[in-house]
Amino acid sequence: MKIIPIQDVAGQKFSIVLGGQDCTIELFVRSTGMYCNLYVADSLVIGGVICQNMNRIVRDSYLGFLGDLVFHDTQGNLDPTTPGLGTRYVFVYLEESDVF
C-alpha cells in the first residue's frame, strides 16, 4: 500500500510510477462527483471512473493494471471532494498483494 500525494484542487494530472508501471492519472470533478482516468505507458486503462470512498477504481485484473487505486476518507465515510484532497481524502495505491 502506498499513499499517492495529490493536490487539493478539483482538476489535476500527474505522472507516477506504481508497481513498476509508468502511470499518468487525471482526477477531475463533475456535478456528480470526482472521476479518474488512468493511463499506463500512455495507454488508457480506465476512463471516467467515479471515485468513491473505499471503492476500488480499477477493479478488474484483466485490464492489465497491477494493483488498484482507492480513496479513503480518514474522518468518516464521504466520497472524495475538495477541499480535503490529500489530507482528509487520501489517495492510495494498493499493490497486487493488497488486492484480493
Image (cartoon, rainbow, N blue to C red):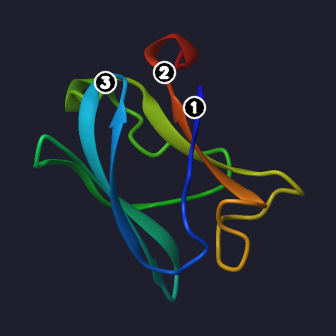
Dot 3 alpha-carbon crowd within 10 angstroms: few under 14, some 14 to 19, many 20 or more? few
Measured as percent of width and height from the top left, residue 9 is found at: 55, 79
Image height check: is 29 above or below 84?
below
Q: Residue at x 38, y 40 (%)?
A: 58
Dot 2 alpha-carbon crowd within 10 angstroms: few under 14, some 14 to 19, many 20 or more? some
Disc 1 or 3, which lies upstream in sequence? 1
In front: 40, or 100? 40
Number of marks drawn: 3
Pointer 3 residue: 61
Q: Residue at x 65, y 78 (%)?
A: 82
Q: Is residue 12 left or right of residue 46?
A: right
Element under disc 1: strand
Question: Between tags 3 and 2, which lies in front?
Answer: 2
| Residue 63 in which image quadrant | top left
Measured as percent of width and height from the top left, residue 22 is found at: 23, 37
Pointer 2 residue: 95
What is the number of the mark on residue 2? 1
Residue farthest along the right direction in this orientation: 75
Question: Between tags 1 and 3, which lies in front?
Answer: 1
